[in-house]
């Protein structure tokens, strides 16, 4: 049996690079698997102990992923392990507080020279442990508004992944595969990374600078270039909304031409569509942060909590507080 496992890259003993995974409750399974499997495949193709790995949880008990599957771990997370890299697989509820002992151990490992990585929402833990500093980082696009609210001083990018010194972060999903293939190429060579990519029918290794999200064209089926530009400007200016006149000038249209475009393609005025974008951003902040309704209203460019709540109820058919009560149950968030 051991020979069969070794032929698949599951080698016994410690690899040249020993990688730890800290799995938080409700972690996302896809980026975790997408990070681990390239190491196994690199072992298989090289025939060497290039990588080994160890799974941790904060309690040492099995961890339940966001898809409901329970995964056993090797050990309780501590700072006594000799690791070359640690990868934090974040929780589906990243706004919830992190235990101080976990943050303390992250800092100790980093102080010993361990490279610190994060998948999906794991960047919240690295940021709370004050490990990111002036380095660039990223995380899943859905959680960026809450992250930027909690850590306005950090350099947060929209890229698939960031490798900046001893800090490497990833947006999640199958972008973790691209990040790990890049790490394999950096550790060894591009030929090995290409073999691993081909094994997983991954015909193109994406660059870190590739976009996390589909373009407006792909996502919404909108092809008019100036309308696309106007919507992208709206999405980039949530907290301080641009006036329709400003938007029109920035895309080289008159206000009337801009309004005509929105009516013909979206059956809405620019103001109405912009408000819907800001309300959806508020919806995400309600579920991803512990910010008050007033703070979220301000972050989404509404003049008051009452104004935000009224528009929110009209659009989502429930109030902001009802949404939180439904999502979090008895865990009250104002």
Image (cartoon, rainbow, N blue to C red):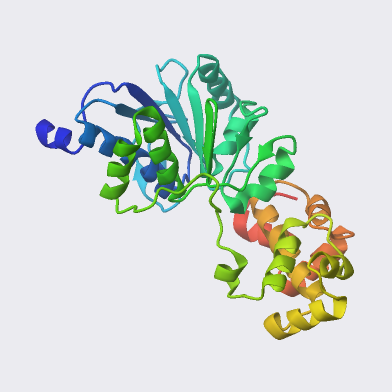
Examine the rendered structure and indicate whether residue 330 appears above or below residue 265.
Answer: above
Left/right placement of residue 151 relative to residue 22 reads: right
Q: Which of 57/154 is in front?
A: 154
Please name the residue shown 40% across and 18% down the image: 81
Instruction: Decide if residue 17 is in sight here.
Output: yes
Q: Quadrant of residue 247?
A: bottom right
Please name the residue shown 29% across and 26% down the image: 50
Please name the residue shown 85% across and 81% down the image: 256
Q: Which of 33/289 is in front?
A: 33
Q: Quadrant of the N terminus?
A: top left
Find residue 37 and report its horizontal and vertical position in percent.
32, 41
Numbered circles on residues, count: 0
Examine the rendered structure and indicate whether residue 139 appears above or below residue 101.
Answer: below
Left/right placement of residue 78 relative to residue 6 reads: right
Instruction: Decide if residue 317 is in sight here.
Output: no
Q: Quadrant of residue 100?
A: top right
Find residue 128 and report its horizontal and vertical position in percent.
64, 31
Q: Which of 250/334 is in front?
A: 250
Find residue 62 and report its horizontal and vertical position in percent.
37, 37
Q: Which of 91/333 is in front?
A: 91
Find residue 11 and report its horizontal and vertical position in percent.
21, 29
């Amino acid at each position: 049996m051991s020979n069969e496992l070794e032929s698949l890259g599951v080698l016994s003993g410690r690899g040249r690079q020993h990688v730890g995974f800290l799995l938080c409750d409700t972690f996302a399974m896809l980026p975790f698997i997408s990070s681990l499997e390239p190491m196994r495949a690199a072992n298989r193709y090289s025939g060497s102990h290039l990588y080994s790995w160890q799974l941790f949880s904060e309690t040492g008990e099995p961890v339940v992923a966001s898809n409901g599957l329970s995964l056993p771990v090797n050990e309780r997370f501590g700072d006594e392990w000799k690791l070359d890299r640690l990868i934090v697989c974040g929780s589906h509820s990243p706004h919830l507080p992190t235990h101080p002992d976990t943050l303390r151990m992250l800092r100790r490992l980093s102080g010993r020279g361990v490279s610190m990585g994060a998948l999906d929402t794991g960047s919240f833990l690295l940021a709370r442990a004050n490990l990111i500093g002036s380095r660039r980082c990223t995380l899943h696009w859905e959680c960026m508004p809450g992250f930027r609210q909690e850590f306005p001083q950090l350099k947060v990018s929209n890229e698939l992944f960031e490798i900046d010194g001893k800090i490497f972060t990833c947006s999640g999903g199958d972008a973790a595969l691209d990040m790990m293939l890049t790490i394999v190429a950096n550790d060894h060579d591009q030929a090995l990374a290409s073999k691993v990519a081909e094994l997983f029918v991954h015909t193109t290794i994406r660059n870190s600078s590739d976009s996390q999200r589909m373009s407006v064209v792909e996502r919404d089926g909108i092809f008019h270039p100036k309308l696309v530009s106007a919507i992208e400007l709206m999405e980039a200016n949530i907290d301080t909304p641009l006036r329709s006149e400003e938007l029109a000038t920035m895309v080289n249209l008159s206000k009337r031409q801009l309004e005509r475009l929105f009516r013909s393609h979206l059956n809405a005025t620019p103001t109405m569509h912009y408000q819907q974008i800001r309300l959806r951003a508020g919806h995400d902040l309600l579920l991803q942060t512990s910010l008050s309704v007033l703070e979220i209203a301000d972050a989404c460019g509404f003049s008051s909590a009452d104004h935000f709540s009224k528009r929110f109820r009209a659009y989502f058919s429930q109030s902001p507080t009802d949404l939180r009560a439904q999502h979090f149950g008895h865990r009250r968030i104002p």
